């Protein structure tokens, strides 16, 4: 009868209450064989006799190959060269007296939160002028609220390419499925590229126009685009309310004829806009979102690509546009905090 009672407990032998019950029966004169014919029972009783406790002694495990001081040295080596591989770090660590594998190196770095990731791509801020201009811009607009930014129309040009316009695509596949149709991203030597100009504000997306093939992106094309695309957008979204227009420092944007035309149209300009600063323009995030959506449609020719671009552009919600605009105060604050360097956006 006793064995019948205890046996169900053996399915939970790691439970503290189960171990206590076994020891209680042992103290009352029952042997391990009386309690249940299980080797686990004898192990618990032996552990209790030797240590006087029902708790299982934690195994010591394999001793670490490195000391805390050596771990700190490894961290300094990695931070000195962020692109060094685990194997390279293991070799350099070995010169300091630590014989460890690349796998051990990865574990030590993981303990410090250093994980291998694909490097972020940002425009090179090689000149002090780039950083200075970014700081001047951010200081000028540091007091602006999300409501202030809601009066700005952001604009930019962007390229769209057939077959993976948004870059690399990750797939999950099983062994042997590397070349399965659903796991392959098609490529061509010279993919068709479509250039577009678009604008948006907190009120939603504005006009989007596609640059015709064999048309240069020059001041004549840009003035025509502003006339036919920007002015209708400002009228539709803001009516008689004053708004501010943003564009970057591309040569065709800064041409004298364009500056004069914008002045004649009473278009107020945000800026001066700092060079190499896509992280300050939320339309860059909008382009990334649009390219991912277009890629999912898998257009197979230029006509289909243009059709999908226009369809997905108008499908962008006003809520998404507003959230991107509302991120501007955070962008400004982060660039100031980083003393003009790139922010996460």
Image (tube, grey):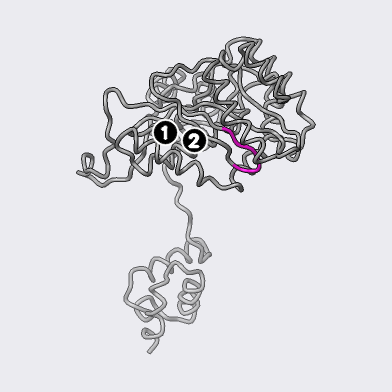
The image shows a total of numbered marks equal to 2
**Residue 340's mark?**
none
Find numbered disc 2 in the image and state the secondary structure of the residue it sits on.
Answer: helix
Vertical side of 152 occupied by 125: above or below: above
Vertical side of 76 occupied by 173: above or below: below
Comparing 213 with 326, the one in front is: 213
Residue at (29% x, 37% y) in the render: 300
User: Dividing the image into 4 quarters, which one contains the N terminus?
Assistant: bottom left
Look at the image and give the residue range highlighted in magenta: 199-204
The answer to whether 309 appears left or right of 135 in the picture is left
> Which residue in the structure is indicated by mark 1?
166
Spot occupied by residue 286 in the image (x, y as percentages of width and height) = 54, 37
Q: Is residue 203 magenta?
A: yes
Q: Earlier in the sequence, mark 2 or mark 1?
A: 1
Task: Give neighbour class at mark 2: few <14, some 14-19, many 20+ (Cα, 10 Å).
Answer: some
Spot occupied by residue 325 in the image (x, y as percentages of width and height) = 65, 38
Q: Are marks 2 and 1 in contact (CB under 8 Å)?
A: yes
Farthest residue toward the bottom? 1
Spot occupied by residue 176 in the image (x, y as percentages of width and height) = 20, 44
Q: CA distance from mark 2 to mark 1?
A: 7 Å
Task: Give neighbour class at mark 1: few <14, some 14-19, many 20+ (Cα, 10 Å).
Answer: some
> Which residue in the structure is indicated by mark 2?
288
User: Dividing the image into 4 quarters, which one contains the C terminus?
Assistant: top right
Q: Is residue 253 magenta?
A: no
Find numbered disc 1 in the image and state the secondary structure of the residue it sits on.
Answer: loop
Instruction: Write down the quadrant of residue 305 in the picture.
Output: top left
């Amino acid at each position: 009868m006793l064995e019948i009672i205890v046996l169900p407990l053996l399915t939970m032998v790691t439970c503290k209450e189960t171990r206590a019950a076994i020891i209680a029966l042992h103290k009352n004169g029952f042997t391990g064989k009386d309690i249940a014919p299980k080797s686990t029972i004898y192990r618990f009783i032996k552990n209790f006799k030797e240590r006087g406790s029902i708790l299982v002694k934690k195994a010591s495990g394999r001793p670490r190959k490195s000391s805390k001081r050596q771990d700190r040295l490894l961290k300094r080596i990695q931070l000195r060269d962020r692109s060094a591989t685990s194997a390279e770090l293991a070799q350099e660590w070995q010169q300091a007296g630590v014989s460890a594998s690349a796998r051990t190196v990865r574990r030590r770095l993981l303990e410090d939160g250093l994980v291998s990731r694909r490097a972020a791509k940002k425009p090179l801020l090689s000149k002090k002028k780039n950083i200075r201009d970014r700081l001047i811009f951010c200081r000028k607009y540091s007091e602006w609220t999300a409501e202030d930014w809601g009066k700005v129309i952001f604009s930019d040009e962007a390229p769209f390419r057939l077959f993976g316009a948004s870059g690399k695509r990750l797939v999950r596949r099983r062994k042997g499925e590397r070349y399965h149709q659903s796991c392959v991203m098609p490529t061509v030597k010279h993919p068709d590229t479509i250039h577009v100009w678009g604008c948006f504000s907190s009120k939603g997306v504005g006009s989007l126009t596609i640059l015709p093939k064999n048309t240069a992106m020059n001041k004549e094309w840009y003035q025509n685009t502003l006339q036919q695309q920007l002015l209708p957008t400002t009228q539709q979204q803001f009516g008689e309310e004053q708004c501010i227009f943003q564009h970057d420092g591309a040569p065709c944007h800064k041409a004298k004829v364009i500056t004069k035309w914008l002045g004649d149209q009473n278009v107020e300009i945000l800026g001066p806009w700092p060079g190499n600063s896509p992280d300050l323009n939320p339309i860059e995030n909008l382009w990334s979102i649009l390219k991912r959506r277009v890629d999912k449609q898998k257009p197979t020719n230029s006509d289909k690509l243009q059709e999908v671009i226009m369809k997905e552009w108008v499908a962008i919600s006003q809520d998404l546009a507003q959230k991107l605009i509302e991120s501007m105060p955070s962008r400004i604050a982060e660039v100031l905090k980083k003393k003009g360097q790139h922010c996460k956006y």
